[in-house]
Image (tube, grey):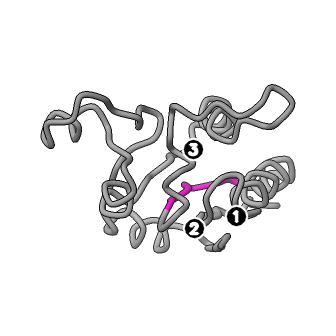
Amino acid sequence: MHHGLHYGLLVMGAPYSSPAPHSALRFAHAIIARGHKIAGVFFYHDGVHNGASLMAPPQDELNLHEAWRELNQQHAIPLDICIAAALRRGLMSESEAQRHGQPAFNVAPPFELTGLGQLLDLQQRADRFITFA
């Protein structure tokens, strides 16, 4: 009997300046189509910019933020963002914005700000772990 593998994805490139997010999304859809599962996606370094909810690319371009949201909605895949990398680059959830006295926030569910413990957990849970940098 065929058992699907669980894949963990690490995305380290920013949307529109790196091919990494696009490659990771294409890979995720291909893997799911073949009966495998994505255990989670962790956004690290410049990859945290995928979680920016205020992204508004031109109409004829793929909105990578929306594409990740759709992946989460269709397949319940956790989307974790490294909190240290995010705060350093100006990405905050509502609670972090309040904590830092900021008037606005740009990270919202299904994206979650988490620590590196989540990355280690994902690496342990996944049969295959793939980095897109």
Q: Position of residue 121 (x, y in %)?
A: 40, 67
Q: Residue at x 37, y 63 (%)?
A: 85
Q: CA distance from mark 2 to mark 1?
A: 22 Å
What amino acid does circle 1 point to?
Leu
- Secondary element at image label 1: loop
Q: Position of residue 114 (x, y in %)?
A: 32, 54
Q: Residue at x 49, y 73 (%)?
A: 123
Q: Residues within 10 Å of mark 1 (few under 14, many from 20)?
A: some
Q: Which residue is identified by label 2?
A: 12
- Secondary element at image label 2: loop
Upstream in sequence: badge 3 or badge 2: 2
Q: Residue at x 62, y 72 (%)?
A: 127
Q: Position of residue 25 (x, y in %)?
A: 74, 51
Question: Label 1 near label 2: C-beta < 8 Å?
Answer: no
The range drawn in magenta is 37-43
Q: Nearer the viewer, mark 3 or mark 2?
A: 2
Q: Which residue is identified by label 1?
A: 5
Q: Which residue is identified by label 3?
A: 77
Q: Position of residue 19 (x, y in %)?
A: 76, 62
